[in-house]
Amino acid sequence: MNTTRTLYDVLQVSAHAEPEIIKAAYALLLRQRDRGTDPGTLRLMKDAFDTLIDPASRASYDAKLRNAQPAAADVTAAEPALESPPSAWARWLLIALAFAGGYTGASMWHQRTITEMILEHESALARQQAEIARLTLDQRAHEFDARSSQSQAAREQRARDAEARQRERDIAATKARLDRDSAAYQRAREREEKAREREALRRVEQTRRERAAEDARNARLAQQRLANEKRELERLYRENYPQYR
């Protein structure tokens, strides 16, 4: 009877196990090992995992197993001729059945444990993904709030800038209006000064003309008085001194 252990037996998985099952089985065996585990056993487990997890090396190993099966069948066929009592075959058969039943039960338990481990891993992965999604949503909400705050701050800054520009325009308009009013007032004052100067000149000229006219009248009156006095003297002279005619 062939009792050679395969790499599948080392990892306690079936020959048709998926890569995920092989990974889970290897992780479970590493978790279940104690501190006194033989380094050779750990090395064998590591070699089995490296061989079965790689598709090319696993295919090569499966081919070797298939090639070794005919030789094992020939040895098994030759063994009945060497065994004398049929009862020994019955005992070997019972032992093989018991071993097969125990191995099947262990495999089923191991498969169930691996399945539970995979489900637990998937549940943890789902929780982790949900947490990542929640954190992502929180981050996006924070970024949205930050962008909203920045937009609000930008709008407020634009409003302040617009208000400052409006104040500057109002100040400029007020200054221009004051400048115009000041220029108009200055021109009005200049016109008033010129009008007063012209009025003063007119009055001076009028006074001068009036004085000239008065002087001319006085001169005429003086000439008239002088002429009257001269005629009066001539009359008196003729009346008083007729001999000197």
Image: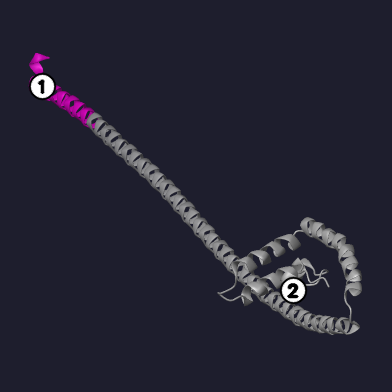
Q: Is residue 129 above or below residue 206?
A: below
User: Residue drawn 75% across and 71% down?
Assistant: 9
Seen from the viewer's position, the closer of residues 35 and 87 is 87
Amino acid tagged 2:
Gln
**Circle number at residue 142:** none
Amino acid tagged 1:
Tyr
Please provide percent x and percent y for residue 147.
Answer: 58, 63
**Circle number at residue 237:** 1
Residue under circle 2? 12
User: Residue drawn 51% across and 59% down?
Assistant: 157
Residue 224 among those drawn in magenta: yes
Q: How many neighbours does mark 2 have within 10 angstroms: few (below 14), some (14-19), or many (20 or more)?
A: some
| Of labels 2 and 1, the one closer to you | 2
> Which image quadrant is residue 113 in?
bottom right
Q: Is residue 240 above or below residue 74?
A: above
Instruction: Classify residue 96 as left or right of residue 156.
Output: right
Q: How many neighbours does mark 1 have within 10 angstroms: few (below 14), some (14-19), or many (20 or more)?
A: few
Outermost residue toward the top?
244
**Are the two marked residues, 2 and 1, in contact with CB atoms closer than 8 angstroms?**
no
Instruction: Classify residue 217 as left or right of residue 92.
Output: left
- Is residue 20 in view? no
Q: CA distance from mark 2 to mark 1?
A: 187 Å
Q: Which quarter shows the C terminus?
A: top left
User: Residue drawn 78% across and 69% down?
Assistant: 4
Q: Earlier in the sequence, mark 2 or mark 1?
A: 2
Residue 236 among those drawn in magenta: yes
Magenta span: 217-245
> Which image quadrant is residue 197 in?
top left
Describe the element under mark 1 as helix, strand or loop.
helix
Seen from the viewer's position, the closer of residues 179 and 65 is 65
Q: Which quarter shows the N terminus?
A: bottom right
Please provide percent x and percent y for residue 208.
Answer: 26, 33
